[in-house]
Structure formats: C-alpha cells, structure tokens
Amino acid sequence: MQNDMHNKAILVTGGAGYIGSHAVLALKDAGRPVAVIDNLVTGFRWAVPDDVPFYEGDIADSELLAKIIAEQNIGAIMHFAGSVVVPESVSDPLKYYHNNTVRSRSLIESAVKGGVAHFIFSSTAATYGIPETSPVTEDTPQRPINPYGTSKLMTEMMLRDVAAAHPINFCALRYFNVAGADPQGRSGQSTAGATHLIKVAVEAALGKRDGVAVFGTDFDTPDGTGVRDYIHVSDLAAAHVIALEQLIAKPEQSHFLNCGYGRGYSVLEVLDAVDRVTNMTINRKLEGRRAGDPDALISDNSAIKARFEWEPALDDLDMIVTHALNWERELANRKEA
C-alpha cells in the first residue's frame, strides 16, 4: 500500500477555502499530486493553483465523486469542506447538520466505494465544549455546546466506525484557533465578514472596520479577556501532510489529535500584537461576553508531537499577525486592481 500511494493523488475538499487552500499548497510543496473539489459558496476559484485539477461541485454528489476518484487516481482525501460559523450553527442547526454531517457521511461512503485508503478530517476543539481542565488533551470528554461542534463530533464518530468495518484509516485533527496566511503570500483568510479575531483586527488596522469588539472582560484569566491557542495556518497545513505520511506508513492505525501550540494568548494580547506590528492603536470596543465562550481553550499538543514528530515552524504571534496583515493588504490591492 505504501508504494501504491506514490502515483495516487490526494483529493482536497474545500480546497478553495482558507485552510484547504493552504493544504493544497503544502501538498504541492511536498511533491504530492493534488485535486480539489469545492462548491465555491465560501471558497474562491483563484485560491486554487492553475495546475491543480479543479471540480466545482458538492461533496455529496456521489456520481461526481466516483468520477473524480477514478479520473485522478485518488488514494487519500483531505476533508475541509463545511460550515464553520458557531453562532450561525446555533440559529440554523439544520444547515450545519446537513453541510457538516450528512454531506460528510456521503463523502465517506464515496471514499469507501472508490477504494480510497486514507482520510484526513478537519475537526475542531469545539468538540470539547467547555473543558473542565486546561490544557485540553485528546482524552478530555467531548461535550460540544453548539451544533457546529456536535456536527464535527458526529463525523469523527462515523470515521471511527467506518475504519473498523472497511480498509480505510483516518486522522481527525482537532484545530484550535487558526490564523495567519501563507508566508509566501499565495493564500490567506479571504472570507468577507470573517469572525476570526486576528483577521478582524488586521481589517481594523487597515481601516476596513472601525474597531474590534472585545467580548467579555470578566473571564477567569490574567487580564479578564478570553485566552485562546492560535496556530499558524501553514503549520496546520504541514501537520496534514505529516498525518498523510503516517497514515500511509501505518495503514492499520488511525488518530484523533489536537492541533495547536500548547499555549494561549488573551484577546488583549492579540490586539497588542497587532498594535505592535502596525505601529498604531486599534479602537477596542468592550462588550459583554458571548454565551458559551470558555475562559481559556489551550491544546495539549504533546500527542501529535510525539506520534508524528510534528514541530511548529511559525509559532510566533507577531509573525502570525504580520502574515495576516500582509495578506489583508494583498486582498485590498486585488480589489483595487
């Protein structure tokens, strides 16, 4: 099986989106053949390199999936397609169970029918809900508090059950707070109206917003604002490539692993970093906390480091902010061009 994968391609679902497009770049940089499927609802066609086969469509379209798996000789799938806005999942849970759970079930079925041997799933720390202990290990009870987290947890459960019944292994990577952009400026977070703090803050620094809302100043943290574990999107993409190599090397093993840096920054510390990098002061609007926001959400990343020998290369908050800012400027130039 190991040798067999050398001439097989990797299908990236949601490869025109934020994290998926960085995974495509990481796979290409590693010399792996890649193909992309994306429905372009939130993704961008220009985010996929010209030399990567691209299919505009739905991951639940089983006929299209069978065609792609055959045409591109797909040996592994990296699954990023889905909906990711937590408050929207609360107001429209059926959308999230359809996009994230039902469509994933169809995709997994297509993978099994097509003889795809390896599956990497974009999961989330939201599956833990509000953990009682921090840092969060993979053994922390998974008690999601919103439909987004539940929809992802259900997909994790499907993968575990399918791998027990079929010749397929998987890795579910539970992301913490993903931020930054490709250091070479090839891709970045491009979604309009994004809710990610660093994205919002660099938009404010460039005058695209009149400030940044700080939701909650009474958390049980050193400065009263929520603490999160921010991981550079390119380090996260690199983790997917290493996960693929491990799945190929040991087809009998599957994995659930946290993806973070193992330390956190508060909202105010992130805004201070943006002020430092831009040499200006962002307007901060202090507001009440949002329902369900934990005080701190920090990963224990010892398992992925030990199992995959993954070592972050971009673990620096000012660097993450700088790359996000550079990309935001690039986006502004594109719109003016």
Image (cartoon, rainbow, N blue to C red):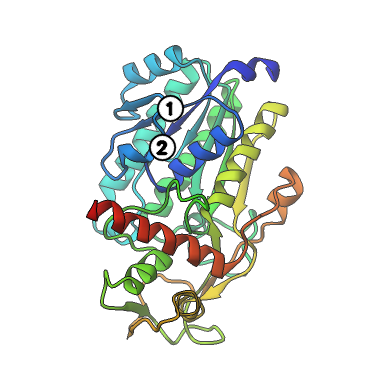
Q: CA distance from mark 1 to mark 2?
A: 10 Å
**Helix, strand, or loop for circle 1?**
loop
Left or right of 74 in this view: 169: right
Residue where numbered disc 1 is placed: 52
In the image, residue 25 sits, relative to residue 87, either above or below, namely above
Q: Residue at x 55, y 45 (%)?
A: 237
Q: Which mark is residue 15?
A: 2
Query: Where, quadrant-wise, is the N terminus in this rendering?
Result: top right
Q: Which mark is residue 296?
A: none
Left or right of 113 in this view: 282: left
Judge the density around disc 2: few (<14), some (14-19), many (≥20) Cα neighbours within 10 Å: many
**Helix, strand, or loop for circle 2?**
loop
Residue 100 visible from this viewpoint: yes
Q: Nearer the viewer, residue 2 or 104?
A: 2
Q: Which amino acid type corresponds to the residue marked 2 in the rendered image?
A: Gly
Q: How many marks?
A: 2
Mark 1 and mark 2 in contact? Answer it, CB < 8 Å: yes
Q: Position of residue 253 (x, y in %)?
A: 69, 32
Q: Position of residue 120 (x, y in %)?
A: 54, 36
